[in-house]
Amino acid sequence: MTTILYEHPLNERIRNYLKLEQLFKQVDSCANSGISTSHQVFFNALFAIIDMLERSDIRGDLIKDLEKLQQNLVIWSQAPNIDTSVLEENLQETSNLARQLKANSQTWCQLKEHKLLASLKQRFAIQGGNSSFDLPQLQFWLHQPAAIISKDMEHWLSLLDNVKNSLALVLKFIRQRATFENIETESGFYQDNGEGLLLLRIKVAQSAQYYPTISGNKFRYSIRFMLPCEQNGRRYSNQATQFQLARC
């Protein structure tokens, strides 16, 4: 059965992680496709990543999560029937990433000092300021040989590798905290205790004509299923509803 996956964070830390993960997906997708048609998405996402790293303590949060993961991996290594080779690989990766993030000089800071990026970022921050006539330097760059453009993009993204890889590892283990279970509700509404949870993951059949809206925090969460509505955009679903839920 083909499903649509919805995810909802239950605290601000995980909310920032998911936002950052989506931005990394956008820059990676643009880097692997024709930049001439996707450059606005690429630079908007790249500058949003820089802003998030500047304004939020994501680095500190990732360090704490990696250190906690290290401790858990050491504990799990004592369990019987554990795949020691996989565990050692994850432990080594966790240790290396934590060490990189703890370094006084963060490589991504070089992006703030890059002359071309700095000039573009200033214009991209203005509503409608990234038109071609406002940014001749961008037009010039976009018409350089493909090898030069690819080299520049690879270099810029490589400066974010330690953050990106740390984020991917932390989210991987958060998502693996729980498996999906089948849930049925008669009214299109579901709620439960959220204590100790970080992330809700919901799978709904692609053929279903409803979708979930989630609200909650670390104490309690609720899931209300909605139906498309031409008059109001959407309306509450009161029908029997089936979905899968992972409480991570």
Image: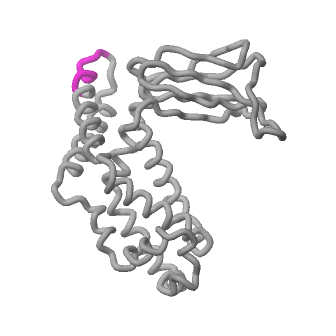
Quadrant assignment, res 153: bottom left
Determine the residue located farthest toward the left in the rendered image: 104
Give the residue drawn at x 23%, y 44%. 98
Residue 99 % position (x, y): 19, 47
Give the residue drawn at x 67%, y 29%. 204
Residue 190 % position (x, y): 62, 17
| Quarter in which the N terminus is drawn | top right
Quadrant assignment, res 157: bottom left
The stretch drawn in magenta includes residue 202: no
Determine the residue located farthest toward the right in the rendered image: 230
| Quarter in which the C terminus is drawn | top left
Residue 87 % position (x, y): 30, 31
Span colored in magenta: 74-80
Which of the two residues, 49 or 141, is positioned nearer the viewer here? 49
Residue 156 % position (x, y): 38, 68
Which color scheme did the rendering employ for the protein? Answer: one colour
Give the residue drawn at x 47%, y 75%. 123
Q: How many marks?
A: 0
Give the residue drawn at x 75%, y 24%. 237
Which of the two residues, 187 or 46, is positioned nearer the viewer here? 187
In the displayed structure, 93 sits above or below 160; it is: above
